Amino acid sequence: MPARSLTPEAVRERGNLPRHIAIIMDGNGRWAKARGVPRLMGHRAGREAVREAVKGCVALGVEVLTLYTFSIENWNRPRREVQALMSILRHTLREERDELRDQNVRLGVIGRIADLPAPVREVIDETRRELSSCTGLLLNLALSYSGRAELVDAIGRMLSEPARGTRPRVDEAFVEAHLETAGLPDPDLLIRTSGEMRLSNFMLWQLAYTELWITDTLWPDFRRRHLYQAVADFQGRERRFGRVD
């Protein structure tokens, strides 16, 4: 079905909706370069794409939307760019609170939050508190995050637990209970923009059986119709989880 003809109602009627969608938001720099504008203009333009993704997930009834917002590797970018990204994040959270509340959206965060500047952490805490009464979509921001770091931190938490007399059974459930996504369903669908074909150290444990949807669309140009097309394509796939027919 053509993306432009898809409506949230039509997508919902098809059934088999993903409970959890994760997105690697890529292409802000290339978007800016193609237009001959500063790189930071691409990051600012990406804000509308985030808004569109949130509204689309709300319309579909998706439970969790996780956005790869700032990776641990991103700290290696030029200091001025990092400072600008933190400023954009802080202002966006403040300015979008009312709209998120109107959409019944909660806020979650995963990653090494202690690495973030204090003013950013304060705004995150304020926003989470102000949206804590919401019961709809969980907007989950991955900040100062990497999949390998999450696993390292999970192992650290396991090793630091006090002895209980008997050795705990180490299985998948035990590991998942120590991840930052404990209690959340694994992503059913991963969307990556800008055509890149890699996971970029994102949710390495959780994406084990996730369906991938790659688009050449750069993140600032991403709109609800792209989300609906990704979900419609997901609905047409058969997930075997390693089983044979």
Image (tube, rainbow, N blue to C red):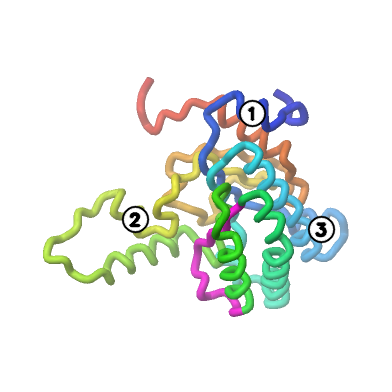
Within-10-Å neighbours for mark 1: few <14, some 14–19, many 20+: some
Q: Which residue is mark 3?
A: 33
Identify the residue at image location x=60%, y=78%: 117
Task: Name the spot of residue 25 as percent of width and height, x first.
Answer: 65, 52
Asked if residue 110 shows in the view, the reply is yes
234, above or below 148, in the image: above
Q: Which residue is mark 2?
A: 177
Q: On the rendered structure, is 34 left or right of 11?
A: right
Q: CA distance from mark 2 to mark 3?
A: 42 Å
Q: Amino acid at mark 1?
A: Val
Within-10-Å neighbours for mark 3: few <14, some 14–19, many 20+: some
Residues under numbered marks 2 and 3 in contact, where contact means CB atoms less than 8 Å apart:
no
Identify the residue at image location x=63%, y=43%: 58
Q: CA distance from mark 1 to mark 2?
A: 33 Å
Identify the residue at image location x=35%, y=53%: 176
Residue nearer the viewer, 52 or 218: 52
Element at badge 1?
A: helix
Q: CA distance from mark 3 to mark 1?
A: 34 Å
- Name, please, the residue furthest toward the left: 165
The magenta stretch spans residue 108: yes
Q: Which residue is mark 1?
A: 11
The magenta stretch spans residue 195: no
Residue nearer the viewer, 155 or 118: 118
Instruction: Give the magenta range.
Output: 105-118
24, above or below 224, in the image: below
Task: Name the spot of residue 77 as percent of width and height, x first.
Answer: 65, 71
